[in-house]
Image: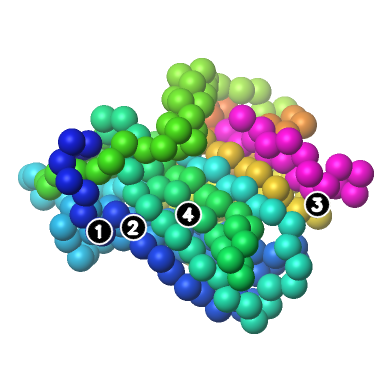
């Protein structure tokens, strides 16, 4: 799918500007949920541009619907002052992270100062003949795109995500002590019926019950969930696991939060 030797189109970079209001902000600054959703759209738009299409509807060569599903995300946020009514600049670029993954980097700048960054990795998938969200398979788009190879930070995220996937995919965990949460079908699932990737973060944060600001959250997505099913969230220190009713894992997160005594905790890797 990817050919790093071919010249790169200008469609692989983008600069967006956003006035920060209530939708974009939370109690501690930039809203994690808004950043994930907004940059997810930027990521998909960059892929569409690299494929030479305007539509965000991706298809296989035989016409089946295709989705650029996220494998991993890493969000880093710095402490900031008041941001309501301020302008945010988001500088984004797209690159190849191996033979089957696409990676994007999004830098968040306020008055010229970088106040955060988001790295995202995705791969193309499709539903199999069952249509179940538990049975998502890799697929290839009808068109090819030529991209530069990703920078070391994205490649490092890709390596950690692959290690996590190899270690945890197919593994089941005991659910004793886990918090059971039922996602809302109308709010937590996206237009193609998949549990929307920012909803994983919302579910994890619901179980955390912490008011301390997030400084880093790295999340590896291992699977998905059918509508009507519940998730079980298990927390142990900085690590959170998200499982289905049968104990099979669908996500793993590692986080660092600010604290009064240690405002600049080291980032997890």
Please provide percent x and percent y for residue 265. 77, 39
- Using the image, tell me which numbered label, if any, was put on residue 212: 3
State the SS at label 3. Answer: loop
Q: What stretch is highlighted in magenta?
A: 252-269
Nearer to us of marks 4 and 3 is: 4
In which quadrant will I find the N terminus?
Answer: top left
State the SS at label 1. Answer: helix
Instruction: Check whether the beta carbons of the residues at disc 2 and disc 1 lie within 8 A of each other.
Output: yes
- Using the image, tell me which numbered label, if any, was put on residue 106: 4
In front: 135, or 146?
A: 146
- Using the image, tell me which numbered label, if any, was put on residue 10: 1
Q: Does the magenta stretch include residue 110?
A: no
- Ranked by sequence position, the earlier of labels 4 and 3 is 4
Whether residue 162 is visible here, answered yes or no, is yes
Please provide percent x and percent y for residue 171. 52, 20
Q: Residue at x 29, y 54 (%)?
A: 12
């Amino acid at each position: 799918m990817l050919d790093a030797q071919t010249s790169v189109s200008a469609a692989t970079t983008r600069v967006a500007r956003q006035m920060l209001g209530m939708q974009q902000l939370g109690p501690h600054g930039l809203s994690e949920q808004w950043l994930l959703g907004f940059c997810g759209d930027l990521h998909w738009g960059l892929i569409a541009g690299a494929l030479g299409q305007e539509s965000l509807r991706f298809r296989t060569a035989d016409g089946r619907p295709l989705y650029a599903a996220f494998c991993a995300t890493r969000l880093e946020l710095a402490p900031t002052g008041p941001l309501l009514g301020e302008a945010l600049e988001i500088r984004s670029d797209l690159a190849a992270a191996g033979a089957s993954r696409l990676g994007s980097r999004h830098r968040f700048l306020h008055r010229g100062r970088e106040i955060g960054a988001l790295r995202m990795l995705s791969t193309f998938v499709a539903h199999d003949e069952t249509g179940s969200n538990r049975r998502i398979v890799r697929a290839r788009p009808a068109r090819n795109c030529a991209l530069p190879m990703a920078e070391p930070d994205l490649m490092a995220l890709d390596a950690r995500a692959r290690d996590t996937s190899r270690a945890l995919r197919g593994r089941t965990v005991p659910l004793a002590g886990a918090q059971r949460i039922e996602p809302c079908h109308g709010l937590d699932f996206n237009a193609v019926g998949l549990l929307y990737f920012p909803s994983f973060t919302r579910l994890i944060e619901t179980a955390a019950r912490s008011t301390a600001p997030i400084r880093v959250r790295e999340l590896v997505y291992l699977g998905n969930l059918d509508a009507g099913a519940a998730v079980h969230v298990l927390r142990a220190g900085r690590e959170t696991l998200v499982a289905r009713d049968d104990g099979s894992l669908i996500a793993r997160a590692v986080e660092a939060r600010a604290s009064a005594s240690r405002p600049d905790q080291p980032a997890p890797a």
